[in-house]
Each structure stands twice: as structure tokens, then as C-alpha cells.
Image (cartoon, grey):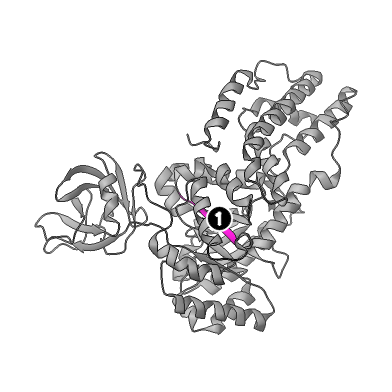
Amino acid sequence: MTTLIPECDSLAEKLRQQKEDSFDSSTLDLSNPQVLLETLQKLRQMVIKEGEDIFELWRSRIQRQVFLNSGLNLAHYLALRRHDLRSLQAALIPWGLSSLGRLEARVIPSLDAVISTLGAICQVNLATSIGRPADEVFWEGDRILREQTEEILGQTASDRRVRIMVTLPTDAASDVEFMQDLLERGTNCVRINCAHDSAEIWEAMIRNVRLAERETGRTCKVLMDLGGPRPRLEKVSAPKHKHRIFKGECLVLTHDSPKSHPNCFQASCTLPEVLDRLQVGETAWIDDGRIGARVESITKKGVHLRITQASLKGSKLAPDRGLNFPDTDLQLSPLTDKDLEDLDFVAAHADIVGYSFVQTADDIKLLQKELAARMTHPHKIAIMAKIETPQAVSNLPELIVQAEGQQPFAVMIARGDLAIAIGYQRLAEIQEEILWICEAAHVPVIWATQVLENLVKQGIPSRAEMTDAAMAERAECVMLNKGAFVAEAVTILDDVLTRMQEHQLKKTPQLRALHSW
């Protein structure tokens, strides 16, 4: 199982050394309030000690004063979540106390509040360092997250907490009224995908965004998303009289232009060097996971794939369809030559730079170095890291510390590529873990990939995607892809998020009066 523990040799060694002193309450009589109190006090001591050890490894990388408390809280949260707390949670509930299920933004204050109240129940004089935290201390993490969200993703013109981001189509470069309509309907930030269009079109898009801001009186942040090293099908050659590929058939990925073959599809790859990394038995996904395959053999002609998943009516293979190899370390730099060229424009025009396929803290350092070479004040631009691989999930705390320690930082859960990389059955679980870790670090999260996709593309939402949009209230921002009905989707999403925040705030249910019965 993927775990959100930072990959750092010295930290890993410290955690191994601490394993013998692991917290275990399964054998204790937690129905006794005195035992329960002593157990919580022991847990608090362990969390503080282990959290300080983690934070000490990070301290030299933290230059922003605002992140000091956030980094320490994140370290405490990692230390806390090393332990299984389910029996302790069950024991707290009958006493009417917090079961610690919503402490992400405030780890130690939450423990202190429970210990203080339980101490009063047991009529025990606690150590002077433990007491009921003042309100401003208890809610400090929530305040920091709100401020970070507003700094990075902009203000909202209504009472809606969650921001709405829209991916701009090419037409946005020539249609200022379209931009005005998006802002009036509730759009808070826009995304420009640098994998498409050109610098001239991007500049026209941003010009229309600024014009729309002046016309509507509403602010809008601009995210420019670097394309990254995404392998794609380049040229495709199909057997004669065949237009679709079926399960059980073969596909050969070639380094050079594909040649016609009587029985087998062939296709070249935009990044042919990745083919040299593949090994027999590894998995491949094509077209956002619509087509699955396995590496059957490798010859001089190329990598032979056997199709394991396709539409019953056959699936189309076409140029520019994405390739994913979740089992393979592709050893690619997250910044391509095109990204470095695009970064010249991004550094001069964007509020946020989107970073694709980031996996390690060194990847963050690389982008920070390139920004510093292009900007007088590189730490003022926000970085938004797209979490789309198992490595990025495992290294998330280290990514946060390296980025947020120097400049504003947000995380996008890129659910499309992430689902392919970790398996669809694990997406919901890992999505929740990412939300928790980011809340502990007071880092805003963007909920992305196919939100209200049917509505955006076809004008009619599915029931499942309406529930997905409602669940997005747990994040700080929701991203919509481009489509013919994206403006209408903004209006509906605005309504859904505004309604849902009356019932849910992050992980916390909001018990407003119900009028359905």
C-alpha cells in the first residue's frame, strides 16, 4: 500500500528506530477514563517527539515564516498517522469527546483539547504545558489555509468557499464576452494548457481575462500548466481494412515511422526513448486508460503489446492519444525542452505555474532554479504540483516542504493519470489521503479531471458526476475541462458547491436545520 511518509534516508532510519516504541492501545481497558487519559498523554508525547525529529530534517529548507507552523503541524500529523488509533477513537466517543477524526489542520491543539477535558472529568491536575488551547490557537491552521487559498486561487465574489477553475479553449483568445460570462457565473481562476496553442494565443487569452476583470469587477487568477514529458502515439499504421483494435490483438510501438503490417497495428511514440525502458510483462495504457495492454515481447522492430482491454466494438488508435506506463520508471526529466521555452512566457505572465509529472523534491528544486533564472522575485509566483504517479504520492510531504518552504504552493489531484498509475480501485482512497496531508500542511488542493464531464461536453450531467461534484467540496478548488457547455457547468457547479458547504466543511459535517421532511 502506498504510504504518505517522506522518502528520506535519515527520516526512514529514525522511524525504524522508533518502531519498537510504537503506540498500541489494543490491550488497554480504554473504558476506564483514567487509562484513557494516560493513553492520550503518552500518544501526545510520542507525536511531539517524533514530529520534532521529522521537522528538524526539514527546517533548513523552510525560508517562508508563514510555513514554519504549517510544516511543524504536518510533521506532527505524519507522526500521529503512523499509529492505528481506531480503538482509541471508539473509546472517546461515549464520553462525548472528539474522536480525533478532524484534526488535520491542528494536531497538537486537538490532542490538548481532548486531554484537558478528560483531565477535568477525571479531576486530575495536568502538566502546565497541557491545557485547553485558546480559540485563536485552535483555529490557526484553518485561518492559514484560508489565507493561502485566497493568495493562490483568488477571492470569491460570493459566500462560496471552494473556487472554480476553468480550462480555456482556443476561442477564449478572441472572445472577451466568453471570458466575461465565465467570471459573472462564478469562475475564480482559469487554466491555460501549454501543451496546446502558442504564446501569441496565450497572450490574447490573458489579455481577455484582464479585460473581463475590469468589465465585471471580479478578479481571476491565471494558471499556466506546463505540458511535461507526456508520451503519446505519434503516427499510427493499421492493417488493411481495419479501423479499430480489439482485445487480444497486437500493437507494436516503434522508434521510427511505423510500417504497414497485414495483421498488427503499429505506432510510433513521441518520446521514443521511453521504449528502451520497457520490460516484458509491464503494463501500458492508451488514451486515458480506455485501452489496456501488456508488453509481450521486445524485438528490433519495437515493443510488442498485447491488448488486454478495449471496447467491445473495438477502440480507435489515433495520433496524439496519451501513453501511460505505470510499472515503468521512465527516467524522464519533468521539464522538457519545450517546457523550458514555455517557461519564459509563463514566468512573465502567470500567477500560478502548473507542474506536470513532478515526483521528487529535486523536481521542485529544478523548477525553482529555472524560475529564479527568469524572474527577479521568483518566490512570488505560486507552484501547483500535479499529483499523478505513485512516486508523487509517496513523496508528497517532501514536495510540500521543498515548495511551500519557499513560495506559495498548491496541489492538483490529477485523477485521470493517477487512477491509471495506481489502479482505479485505489483512487478514492489515495484521493482522501492527499486531501488529509495537504490540509495538515495548510496547502490548497485542486480537484481535477472529468468533473461534470458529460455536462461540459454534452450539456446533460450524469447522476454519478453530480455526486462527484458535491464531494469536491472537500477541496479548495474544482477544475472544469473545456467544452461547449462549460459556462453552464460553472453555473451548476457554483450552485452545487454553495449548497454543499451548508452540509460539509472539508471532513466536518455541518448540521444546519433540515427542511426535507
Magenta region, main secondary structure: strand
119 sits left or right of 264 in the view: right
Mark 1 crowdedness (10 Å alpha carbons): few <14, some 14-19, many ≥20: few
Q: Which of 240 and 223 is in front in this view?
A: 223
Residue that appears at 46% across and 50% down: 388
Q: Where is residue 55 in the image (x, y as percent from the top left)?
A: 66, 37
Q: Is mark 1 on a helix, strand or loop?
A: helix
Residue that appears at 55% across and 77% down: 206
Q: Nearer the viewer, residue 337 or 49?
A: 337
The quadrant holding residue 457 is bottom left
Q: Where is residue 493 in the image (x, y as percent from the top left)?
A: 59, 65
Q: Is residue 331 above or below residue 217?
A: above
Q: Nearer the viewer, residue 245 or 232?
A: 232
**Residue 385 shown in magenta:** yes
Q: Is residue 495 above or below residue 103?
A: below
Q: In this view, does 50 lie above or below 500?
A: above
Residue, disc 1: 467
The quadrant holding residue 128 is top right
Q: Can residue 389 be seen in the rendering of this structure?
A: yes
Query: What's drawn in magenta, residue-wise?
Result: 381-388
Q: Which amino acid does label 1 sit on?
A: Thr
**Residue 306 shown in magenta:** no
Residue that appears at 44% across and 63% down: 340
Q: Can residue 194 be seen in the rendering of this structure?
A: no
Q: Position of residue 508 (x, y in %)?
A: 70, 46
Q: Position of residue 119 (x, y in %)?
A: 86, 26
The quadrant holding residue 109 is top right
Q: The C terminus lies in which quarter of the figure? A: bottom right
